[in-house]
Structure formats: structure tokens, C-alpha cells
Amino acid sequence: MKVDVLLGLQWGDEGKGKVVDVLTPRYDVVARFQGGPNAGHTLEFEGQKYVLRSIPSGIFQGDKVNIIGNGVVLDPALFKAEAEALEKSGHDLRKKLHISKKAHLILPTHRFLDAAYEAAKGDSKVGTTGKGIGPTYADKISRTGLRVGDILCDFETKYAKAKTRHEQILRSMGFSYDLSSVEKEWLEGIDYLKRFPLVDSEHEVNGILAEGKTILAEGAQGTMLDVDFGSYPFVTSSSTICAGACVGLGVSPHRIGEVYGIFKAYCTRVGSGPFPTEQKNEIGEKIGELGHEFGAVTGRKRRCGWIDLVALKYAVMINGVTQLIMMKSDVLDSFDTIKACVAYEVGGKEIDYFPYEVDDSVKPVYVEIPGWNCDLTGMTSENEFPEEFNQYLSFLENELGVPIKIVSVGPDREQTIIRYQD
Ligand code: GDP
Ligand code: IMO
Ligand code: MG
């Protein structure tokens, strides 16, 4: 059988967690393939709200196995806190959460390095989540990283070596830090990890497929934060795109089935970097307020703006999206007019493709669409959609060339409308 991939098409926080939870009943297994605790995936159901960072969002649907794949970077201390909180609220994770031995470990010193590199960048800092993501992936590529499997054999020596190397860099940068305050709970996290099945996930994943079962691969971040195709250097350090699922789980490209591309009815971004449709005005404030646009991980205020179809088309192309999912439609319920960016003006010329360089000189070209001015949040079927909302959906489908198969009208699991049921 196939691996279907669900991934963000914008700058993250599109609502991936909610939709993975909604789609999980259709699959046998859910697997994360990249990123780490920089992710914050929010799920709401039965009056409860959960934010997942390293644990896949299929964890609440029965006994389905959830896998943390080899492409993920894992902070044992944060993982322990996240898993213990879930166990306290009655969710038994022990048997159903499997962790790849090839996933890389985020060390406490990686977090300090993240902070040190950001400080050294000054005004041009990336605005990272501060979770040590970049330095951990850098060690992976430099072939000096530690992996989950390393905790099973002679870990102390390996850890001491990596720590010494990191501390030399930190000292050379004149960065002051207090390792003792965080190292103890990190080492407790290392012990805690051993309670979970630590697996050769590439064998497990391919075995599951060979048995005729299905897998949903859950992306983190978004295409515009991809290390190759995002707004470099203001990106994260992993492959957030569909191809990342092959590398991050160990599956062949011919195993990929549906590619669900998820986007908000508007656009947000956290951290630095270009954002052509950003509204630094009362419109952006209103979207932020109605959409509660604050980071699930850092609590930072998200930058808000209109939907950017130039960037979205690019993301659809890079990922080979087969189905679109539109989130947070309800946030635009009270706008008389909605704008959509259909081209960029660069140096007096209009272009409709995402260029190499996107800076402040890029001006968005908008079309205006009438708003629907009514409350979508209670709607349960697309038959209830107002005409103007249908027009917005048709306009986007036309521009992007892919059907919007799911529409979300609120944060709760139930506020999800499946269109064109297969
Ligand atoms: P993720 O990182 O892609 O999983 O997204 P986040 O969880 O960081 O951010 C999405 C936010 O929007 C969360 O607070 C969700 O509860 C919320 N959300 C998801 N879908 C909807 C929706 O359709 N309407 C509204 N108003 N909120 C939503
Ligand atoms: P989810 O999965 C939104 C952003 C950071 C920063 C850049 C690099 O919840 O959508 P990093 O810590 O990864 O080195 O930061 O990427 N970023 C996210 N923005 N949602 C996320 O995850 C993000 N993960 C990282 O704000 O600009
Ligand atoms: Mg998020």
C-alpha cells in the first residue's frame, strides 16, 4: 500500500495537527518524518486542547501505532515532558509510540548553540524557536551527531565527546550558559526514552506497507520554511516537502500516494524573513485577533496577511499536491472584501512565479473577492456554504489547479467539512 503525505504549504501553523487527527481513522499508522520540537501541532476535541511537539498527531485515535521517524530530531527532556503530560491525562503511549533509532538527538548544548548563533547574527537573525534544531541537523550532516540508537551502547563516552566539542565552540564565541541547570533533566529524558520501542523504523514502515496497510506521514513546519525551497536563509533546517517523507521514513518515492497540501484561508509567519502579503496594519491585527495567531511553541505573535497564491502555487508544484485542505476559513467571516495575491511586481515587471530573491522590493498584486459576512463555524455540510464562500473556494481551486477536498471552519475536530467524498 501507499504512504499518503500531509504537509504545510505556507510558513507553518496551517493546522496540520488538527487534520492529521481527523484523517487518522482512515490509516493504520501515523508517522512524523522531519522537524522536532520546533513544531507545535494543536488538536481540539471533547472540550480539551492538546499541543504536540514531537509526538505524531495520530496518537489520540485508538491504539494506532505512531512512529517518530529517522528524519526527526528529538529532545529527550522535552519529549519526556510531552509524553508524561499525555500519560497523566490518561493516554497510554508505551506500546503505540515507536521511535526510530536513527532519529538524531538534540543535546542541551545544541540549544545553547542555537542561541549563540542567533545572537551572533544580530539584526539578521532567523528568529528560530530556540530548540536547537539547526545545530542538531548541522551535526547530522557533518557526521558528528548522536542518534537515539546510541543511547543503547556506550552512551556516556559518545555524549561526553559531543558535549566537549560543543563547549569549545560556545567558549570560542564568548557565549555564557549554565549547562548544569538543564543537563540533569536531559539525562533523565535519555533514560525515559528506553521505555519506548526503539525501532529500525525503515524496516517497520516498509513491513507495514508490505502487509497492505496504510500510513499517513505528518509534516511539520511548511514548504516556505523548507531548507532548499523556502525563503532561505529564513527557513528551518529540514526538508519539509513531500520528498522529505521518503528520506525521513525510508520509503521509496513510488510508495507515495496522496499528497495533502494544507493552507490557511489567509497567511501567517513567525520569525524573520520575507512575507510579501503581510499586513502591518489593522487588517493584520484583525486577522491575528480573530485567528488567535500566537505561536503554539514560543507564544510569539504571528505576522498575518492575505493569501499568497504565487507562493502557494510554488508549494503545490514542489510537493505534487493532489488534494488541498483549507483551514481557518471562519477567521475571514467578518471581512467585506478579501484579497488574494495573484502576482508579484518586481522591478516594474509583473511575474506570477516565486522568484529566487524575495525582498522588500517585491510588491504583491491583488485581486479582490467579496466576503461572505456570515458565521461558518456551526456549519456541518458544504450545502450550507454561502455563495460568496463557494466563489472563494472555486477561485482558489482554479488558480491552484487542485481540488479543495477538506474545509475547516473552527479549531475543533468536529468543525471539519469533507467535500467530494470519495
Ligand atoms: P500546525 O502547526 O500546522 O498543527 O498548526 P498550529 O496548531 O500551530 O496552529 C493552528 C491553530 O489554529 C491552532 O490553534 C488550532 O487550534 C487552530 N485551528 C485549526 N483549524 C482551525 C479553524 O478552522 N478555525 C480556527 N478558528 N482555528 C483553527
Ligand atoms: P509547525 O510544525 C511556524 C520557524 C521559526 C523560524 C524558522 C527557523 O508548528 O508548523 P527553527 O527553530 O526551526 O530553526 O526556526 O522556522 N518555525 C516555525 N514556524 N510553525 C512551525 O512549526 C515552525 N517551526 C519553525 O519561527 O522562523
Ligand atoms: Mg504549529
Image (cartoon, rainbow, N blue to C red):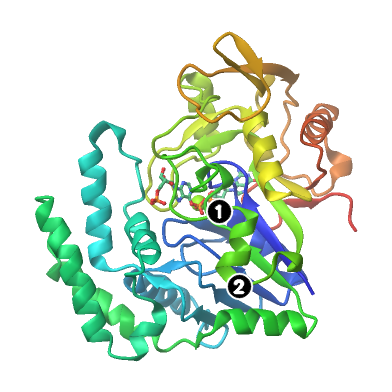
Q: Is residue 5 above or below residue 187?
A: above
Sequence-earlier tag: 2 or 1: 1
List x then y, in percent, for residue 405.
81, 49
Q: Where residue 391 sits in the image (x, y, percent)?
A: 83, 28
Q: Position of 84 compared to 386: left or right? A: left
3D distance between C-alphas at marks 2 and 1: 15 Å
Q: Secondary structure at mark 1?
A: loop
> Which amino acid is tagged 2?
Gly
The mark tally for this picture is: 2
Q: Give the residue at x 31% y 52%.
A: 130
Q: Is residue 143 left or right of residue 57?
A: left
Question: Any mark on residue 355, and which?
Answer: none
Residue 77 figure quarter = bottom left
* Within-10-Å neighbours for mark 2: few <14, some 14–19, many 20+: some
Q: Amino acid at mark 1?
A: Thr
Residue 45 appearing in the image: no
> Which residue position is annotated with label 1?
240
Name the disc covering residue 250, or none: 2
Q: Residue at x 50, y 88 (%)?
A: 197
